[in-house]
Image (cartoon, coloured by chain):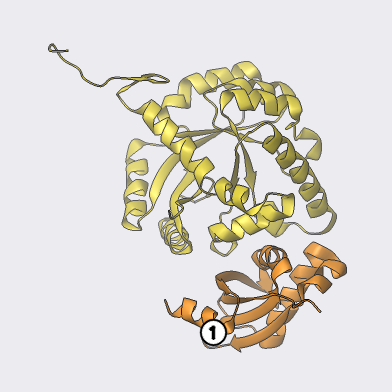
Chain colours: A yellow, B orange
């Protein structure tokens, strides 16, 4: 079966309509079937509908995503309560350990992201992975720094990513490989993203899964949850009315 | 002696300007050496088979064992001769004939 490739982290400038359109078309030409872009929490529904329409014209499925940057675990809980039901994908940028731990154990969090260049604040260790494996959160890895960094910074990043990928595999935490790019020329084909994932130790199957199945599973799960028929995990409304 | 298995990669150069053959190969070797070092580069047996400036396409040959290494290096190319460029792999095959057939499809 043909894989449906996804890029859950495309940075588009919504004010520049033509650039947005070009990026969407490029993503479609490169073989993506699903894209997500981080939106501001106050984004209006009409803008989302417009973007979704543009993506549908190019044959791509559009997914709404919000990036949370809480300072404390309480702040994270507050933001999740406020925004979880408004967006299909929720990513938490973990700026400190307390937030990272809370995000890993909260079932409302889909993606865990860590500062790419501040290596002391990459908190994805065994404890974090164990919490994440119980809550279905996935580790998001952007390939953009691998393209723009050079020398010691890239070496250090690769070494950290390799360690984190090993831990994630061991604890069965899904990895989602995203682009994280805003420039057209930095966009890569899904198989090229998988090839870049080879640099931090993912084998071909796992890497392809990271650019397709892992991302699609998150979207499918959340769309089901956000649907009107969802009651609780495993329970959904089949029939409504007086004759039930 | 054991026969070395090879793979041919058809590449599309995504750039506003057309880099010369020399600039293209310098960029490819540069990316391989930067990512995998001289030892890694020596394992690739990389060579340019065909370069079409009009179509902005190239065919390179590499050893089967180093395909992933070369693909990762090609994906990491962001510029050629100072110009923003990306290199996309169009097809991979074991023979040039099969590669051309894949491209026709």
The secondary element bearing badge 1 is classed as helix
Residue A133: name its quadrant: top right
Residue A18: name its quadrant: bottom left
Q: Residue at x 77, y 34 (%)?
A: A121
Disc 1 chain ID: B
State whether residue B23 is above or below residue A9: below
Q: Is residue A158 left or right of residue A16?
A: right
Which residue, as the protein is rendered here, is positioned at the far front?
B1
- Quadrant showing the C terminus of chain A: top left
Camera-side residue of A67 and A161: A161
Which residue, as the protein is rendered here, is positioned at the far left?
A243
State whether residue B6 is above or below residue A17: below
Q: Measured from the top left, where is residue B32 in percent x and y?
A: 76, 69
Residue A128: name its quadrant: top right
Q: Is residue B92 left or right of residue A101?
A: left
Camera-side residue of A37 and A206: A206
Camera-side residue of A191 and A87: A191
Note whether residue B60 is visible: yes
Q: Is residue A179 left or right of residue A117?
A: left
Give the mark count: 1
Q: Which residue is mark 1?
A: B97
């Amino acid at each position: 079966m043909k894989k449906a490739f996804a890029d859950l982290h495309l940075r588009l400038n919504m004010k520049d309509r033509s650039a947005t359109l070009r990026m969407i078309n490029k993503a479609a030409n490169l073989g993506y079937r699903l894209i997500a872009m981080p939106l501001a929490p106050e984004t209006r529904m009409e803008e989302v509908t417009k973007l979704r329409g543009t993506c549908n014209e190019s044959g791509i499925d559009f997914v709404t995503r919000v990036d949370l940057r809480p300072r404390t675990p309480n702040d994270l809980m507050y933001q999740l309560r406020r925004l979880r039901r408004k967006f299909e994908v929720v990513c938490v940028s973990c700026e400190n350990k307390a937030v990272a731990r809370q995000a890993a154990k909260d079932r409302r969090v889909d993606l865990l992201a860590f500062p790419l260049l501040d290596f002391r604040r990459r908190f994805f260790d065994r404890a974090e992975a164990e919490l994440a494996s119980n809550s279905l959160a996935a580790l998001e890895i952007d390939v953009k720094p691998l393209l723009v960094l050079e020398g010691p910074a890239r070496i250090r990043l690769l070494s950290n990513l390799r360690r984190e990928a090993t831990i994630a595999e061991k604890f069965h935490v899904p990895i989602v490989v995203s682009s994280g790019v805003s420039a057209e020329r930095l966009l890569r084909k899904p198989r090229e993203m998988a090839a870049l994932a080879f640099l931090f130790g993912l084998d071909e199957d796992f890497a392809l899964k990271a650019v397709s199945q892992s991302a699609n599973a998150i979207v499918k799960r959340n769309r089901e949850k956000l649907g009107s028929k969802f009651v609780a995990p495993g329970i959904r409304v089949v029939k409504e009315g007086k004759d039930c | 002696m054991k026969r070395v298995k090879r793979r041919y990669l058809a590449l599309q150069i995504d750039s506003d300007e057309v880099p010369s053959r020399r600039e293209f190969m310098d960029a490819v070797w540069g990316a391989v050496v930067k990512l995998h070092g001289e030892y890694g580069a020596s394992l690739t047996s990389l060579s340019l088979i065909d370069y079409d400036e009009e179509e902005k396409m190239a065919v390179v040959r590499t050893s089967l064992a180093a395909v992933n290494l070369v693909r990762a290096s090609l994906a990491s190319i962001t510029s050629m001769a100072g110009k923003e460029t990306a290199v996309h792999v169009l097809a991979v095959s074991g023979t040039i004939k099969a590669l051309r057939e894949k491209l026709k499809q």
